Amino acid sequence: MVQADVNFVNGKIYTMVSEGESVSAFSVIDGKIAAAGTSSEISQIPAKQTIDLKGAVVLPGFQDTHCHIAEAAEGTKKIDLSSASSMDEVIGMLSDALKKKTDDGWLTAYQVDASHLKENRLPDRFDLDKVSETVPVFVSANCLHNFMCNTAALEKIGKDCLAAAPEKGLMITDKNGSPTGRFLEHGLLKYINKVRPCVLRNDGECKDALEKTLLDFASKGVTTVHTYDGFDGSECDSLGMYQMLERDGRLPIRAVLNRQGGVNNSIGALSGFGNERIKYGAVKLFADGSFSQRSAYVKKEYSDQKNWYGIPIRTDDQMFAAVNTAYEKGNDVAVHVIGDGALEQVLSIIKKIYDSARPQQFRLIHMLFAMPEQLDELAKYPVVVDTQPVFIPNMGILGKARLGAERARYLIAMKSMLERGIIVSGGDDAPIANNNPFVGIRYAVTRETYLGSSEQLYPQECLSVYQAVSLYTKNASYDAHEEKLKGTIEIGKLADAIVIDRDIFNLSAKDISGIKVLATYVGGKSVKEK
């Protein structure tokens, strides 16, 4: 008889194949589930190791379908401004960090949030000049759609370079045309990053930070991350960095690498290249910005700013060319869409280029606001919508202000999507938001405007617990065409599973965010934090 590598017995193992379905045991051979059933049945299979779950609850490993691993890794070396509540605090925290600097490089910070500052605005170069007039200072907003620097940094970047850039309109200037030190969106980062050194200075630092970040995700029950390009130009999002970790036995979980603007590697790989541990995913494009900065592109003017519709990143012709080029080469295409105007632009392109003979699909990232008639159209095509339930509180504050009550009804309308047969997956956009899937699951179920609030963001869009868990398990598998490989606990699938401290399906919804992960298994092997 074949010997299993490990048998898991005496558990409450939710397979997620269908609602409520469970087994008490499963057996693993070569990283995959070879058998599942009762503990007595599985115990009859010879195994090198047997793990007694002692009645604990088990779920398939979670998949985070939208995060920025490089940015999170780089964040371990940046000044975190997320706790700042005023401009003085921003300046004070940066000034304190400057005093501790031991090199003559740039001062780099992230996670400043204008909505948390009493001034209700982001810093500009005049604020940051109070930190230093000689050391370049560079700061990214928590939404990663706004970037700021002081005068010294502007001088390093070179005003002439910025003025000549095709994306120069993304540089905010004052009434005299002088740069304020603020940049919208990502178009100018390629120029800035040519002169701004990455905070991770070599391969060793990159590997250490990357491993630490992936272990953090594993501790929260995540066994696969779908990561998108970082914003610092480090090697943390390169295939080679993940390969080095895997070679050295330091890659704790699986990774799908999605490339911004196209696959940029010497062998010209397309979507799907790789293996069960590391693979290339989709080509990522941007259609618009964010609601926080009113750069999300909407069809009708903003309720709180007359005659303003947001910012379409590309013209219709430019967007068609970008999507069609990626699709024709054989890639999946993932597009950042926030507003219904951006969605309309992308939907019109999908209608024109979709070829049923092709295996590719379209991923719509965020899609915070979509009207019912647009959802009806989307349901006709191979589309996966990557949602972030942790955005629900923010939309409770911003959404109604930006869109008005009538349109805000359709913010993050996950139930409406699922009812139409659209595949909806779950992520968090970390490090922008909390990377604990149980927090996201709670928000998907309750739609609280903040944890513990009795106010809900349109409760008719609340999901069941099973639907919410599916966002991070069986549904998430479709993002990289892995629905036959992971997402449920059944024979033939990867033995990625997590053990949790209580039964998520027999729990008050408001207690879901408190669930702790007792163990994380990838391919049947334990992932232990170092």
Image (cartoon, grey):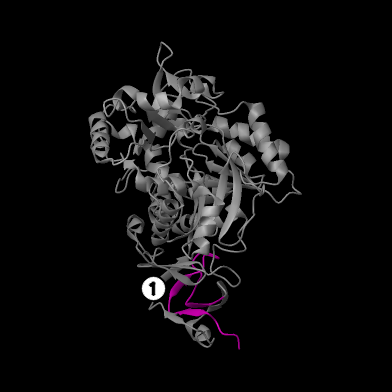
Observer-nearest residue: 450 or 192? 192
The answer to whether residue 501 is seen in the rendering is yes
Could you say where residue 167 lies in the image, as x and y percent from the top left?
Answer: 54, 25
Q: Is 18 within the magenta?
A: yes
* The residue positioned farthest toward the top in the image shown: 176
Left or right side of 505 for 298: right
- Image: magenta residue range: 1-29
Could you say where residue 91 lies in the image, as x and y percent from the top left?
Answer: 26, 31
Q: Is 437 within the magenta?
A: no
Could you say where residue 61 lies in the image, as x and y percent from the top left?
Answer: 48, 63
What's the residue type where badge 1 is placed? Ala
Which residue does the numbered mark 1 point to in the structure image?
Answer: 56
The answer to whether residue 448 is seen in the rendering is no
Question: Quadrant location of the N terminus?
Answer: bottom right
Observer-nearest residue: 331 or 443? 331
Q: Is residue 526 above or below residue 103?
A: below
Could you say where residue 376 lies in the image, as x and y percent from the top left?
Answer: 62, 41
Label 1's element?
A: loop
Query: Residue drawn at (43%, 38%), measured in percent from left and top?
Result: 197
